[in-house]
Amino acid sequence: MTEDHARQQKRLGKMFVAFALFQIIVLLLATIAWAFLPWLGMLGRTETEATILMLAPLLGGWAFSIVSVVLFVLSLIAGISILKNSNSGRAVGVVTAYIALLEIPFGTIFGIYALRRLKSLK
């Protein structure tokens, strides 16, 4: 392994770990938003409308939260594996990058960048 290759691999591993930590921030902000924003739309609504306004963000919030937790775990595993020069790190990184594409805009940017870097690290 050349010195440039090792440096790129180390940088990519650190980026996966940083993306994992970013997922914690995303999850906290999303939880705050889904906990308080529906209450603002309930003012002056009937009981049925208020129930719908409460449930819709919660269902979307759960889906988003699950994706964030999965990305956190996979990003952490990929980053540590890539830093340790493990063979499984690249495979986990590719899966993580594809899932990250769903998180617009930061996940998409990270996913595209990670896929390009992982391809060049063959």
Image: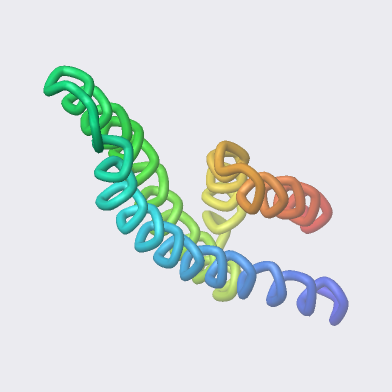
Q: Is residue 23 above or below residue 109?
A: below
Residue at image location 58% in from the left, 52% down from the top: 93
Residue at 32% over, 58% down: 32
Outermost residue toward the front? 44
Up-down relation of residue 82 to residue 122 (above or below): below
Q: Is residue 49 above or below residue 116?
A: above
Please identify the quarter of the rendering in which residue 43 is found: top left
Residue 107 pos. (x, y %): 61, 49
Where residue 104 appears, x then y in whole percent?
62, 42
Q: Residue at x 50, y 66 (%)?
A: 22
Report the residue at 74% width, 46% height from top. 112
Q: As rendered, which of 13 and 85 lies closer to the eye?
A: 13
Where does the image place residue 19, in percent across and percent down from the top left?
Answer: 55, 64
Image quarter of residue 44? top left
Residue 38 falls left or right of residue 17: left
Using residue 53 as the reference point, say whether residue 119 is left or right of it. right
Question: In this view of the protein, which residue sits in the foreground, 90 or 29?
Answer: 29
Number of labelled discs?
0
| Residue 111 image point, x, y percent | 67, 48
Q: Quadrant of the N terminus?
A: bottom right
